[in-house]
Structures are given as C-alpha cells and as structure tokens.
Amino acid sequence: MANTQQRKKPSNSSRNGSPQRQQARPTQKAPAVKAAPVKSPVPAKAPVAKPDKRFSLQPYFLLLGAIVGIVVGLVLALVAGLVVLLPVFALIGAAIGWVTYRRAAAQSFSLVTSYVAAQEIDSEDHPRLFNLLESLCAVSGVAVPVVGVTTDATVNAYVVADPLGDEQSHIVFTEGALRVMERIELEGFVAACLARVKSGRLELQTETAGVVAALGKFIPARLARKALEACFTQQDVFDADLKACGITRFPPGLIAAYEKMSAESTVTSGVNPLNVHLWLANPKSAFAASSSNATGGDASSSTVIGSEVVHPALATRLALLREI
C-alpha cells in the first residue's frame, strides 16, 4: 500500500451537491459618484422661556425725581431765564430719585426682616436642619442663608432677600416646623424656601413690601395695591413649588410637607399686611376666610384684597404637585 495519497483535483461540485466558491474574477470599477453630504440631525433644543417683565419701584423713583428736577428747572428758567439748564436739572432730579430708591431698598430689607421676631441659629443648634440646608444649597446653587426660628408652634416659614444683593437672604422657620417634620418632609420644606430664593422674584417681593411700608401714606393706595399685585402672583407660588421638586428630585417629600402643614396650622405671629406674601403659606387663615366670604371669591386666589395678599390654598398646591 502506498504511503502517499494522490491529491484530488478540485471539482466544481462536492459530493453532497453543495456548490463550492468560485474564484472571484476582477470586475471593472464603476465610476465613483460623489454623494451629497449628509447633514447630521441637529438635536432639538428646549424652548428658552423668556423672563417675565418684572414690576419694580425703581422707574417710579427715577420718574418722580426727573419731574421734580424739571419743575425746579422751570422755576429757575422763569426767574433767571436759564432754559438751557432744564435738561441738566432733569438729570439731577433723576439721579436724586435713583439715590433715594437705593436707600429705600436698603432700608426695606432690614424693615421687612424686623417684622418677625426670631432667634438666629446655627448648625450646633439644629444639626439636622443645617445638614439638609447646606446640601440643598449646594445642589440648587443658592448661598446658605441666615437662619432663624420663631416660638410659634405652627408650621410655616418666612423668606426674605436683600433687593440690592449686598446681604444674605434670610429664612425664618417656626419652631413647630422643626419639631413635627420628619427628615423627608423637612427636606421638601427647606427646598420650597430655597426655591423662593432661587426664583429671582423674592428680591422684588421684599423690596415692594419694605418700600411701601417705609413710605407709608406718601404712596397712593392705588400704587401700593398695584405693587403688591405685580410682585406676588399665583403663578409665582406654583413655579416655586415646581422648582422645589427639581431641587430634591423627590416630589413626595414636598407633598408630605404640605400635607403636614395642612394637618397642622400655618397661622403665625408677627404678620404685617405688607409681608403676608413672604411666608411660605398663608399666615393669616382667618383673614383669608373672612375676605373670601366678604368678596364672594375663592381664598385660593393669589390676589390682593384690601391691602393684603391671599395665598393659594394648600389643597390647590397639593393637587398640582400630585399631577407631577
């Protein structure tokens, strides 16, 4: 028997009938056609919300100062014939109005802060509160505010901010809020206060309350009412609640906090007609009930009745939060 086997020539078909690969023949290349460049789809951008037109008392001070300057210039023009200096007096009057506004805005912060008698606290007094506060401030990008506590056994919070941005914002918690709230509830509660600071509306609300209170009878009642209506609206409250959920990323915490506030009382001491809107919830429930009955309206409407602001009802805010 031979030690070597003869090699079989490759056949076109195998025994089981399956065709074998044929040697690829060189083919002529088709002329290259330049394809049109394909544009990569541009990701859709979220619509950028335009900032709302914010009411401020500053233009009124500038206008009032300019009018006073024009009047003074007219008097001097009639007496000494200095008509050329009329625009100069208008500019001087506007500058005086601007300086007056700056001083009134600076005093408004201290005035509004003094409405509520509170004791300043730190992390040694309430470590759980400051642990939550500092972490939520880091998440939201808000500077850690000055914190105070009142002796009220009810559940509420008072939030103010410096209109000129020179000082830290202030948050005053009632003693009842720090006592009855669990950690998850307190986290949502603190986030709701920081959302007020982050909204950019708190400076205007503090400014309006302080300036109107400082000038008192010198401001017409119609202008004071318009200022309150413009600085605090129902939508401001709902937007702040949504921002609070964005800070914690846990809406049930804020819902539980508002449920605890509904079960307890939100009526607090140290309430002034001009600082009602600076509380997290309505601090004068009795006023809301009597006002709604007197006017035939709904107490949940965030409107100005008389000289006071009426908050949206917590039941309405809870219903919107549960829809998230």
Image: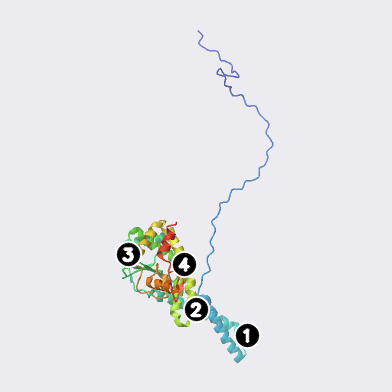
Foreground pick, 69 / 314: 314
* Left or right of 280 in this view: 57: right
Disc sitting over residue 84 in the figure? 1
Mark 4 to mark 1: distance in Å?
49 Å
Report the residue marked by disc 3: 178
Comes first in the chain, label 4 or label 3 = 3
Which is nearer the eye, 296 or 63? 296
- Amino acid type shown at disc 1: Val
Task: Tell me, for residue 234, which label it has, or none.
Answer: 4
Residue 71 vertical position relative to residue 50 in the rendered view, above or below: below
Q: Are marks 4 and 1 in contact (CB under 8 Å)?
A: no
Residue 236, numbered label? none
- Residue 239 lies, with reference to residue 89, above or below; the image says above
Q: Earlier in the sequence, mark 1 or mark 2?
A: 1
N-terminal-most mark, 3 or 2: 3
Q: Element at badge 4?
A: helix
- Pinpoint residue 188: horizontal percent, then vertical percent: 38, 60
CA gap, disc 1 and disc 2: 36 Å
User: Which residue carries the number 2 mark?
Assistant: 222
Disc 4 to disc 3, C-alpha distance? 26 Å
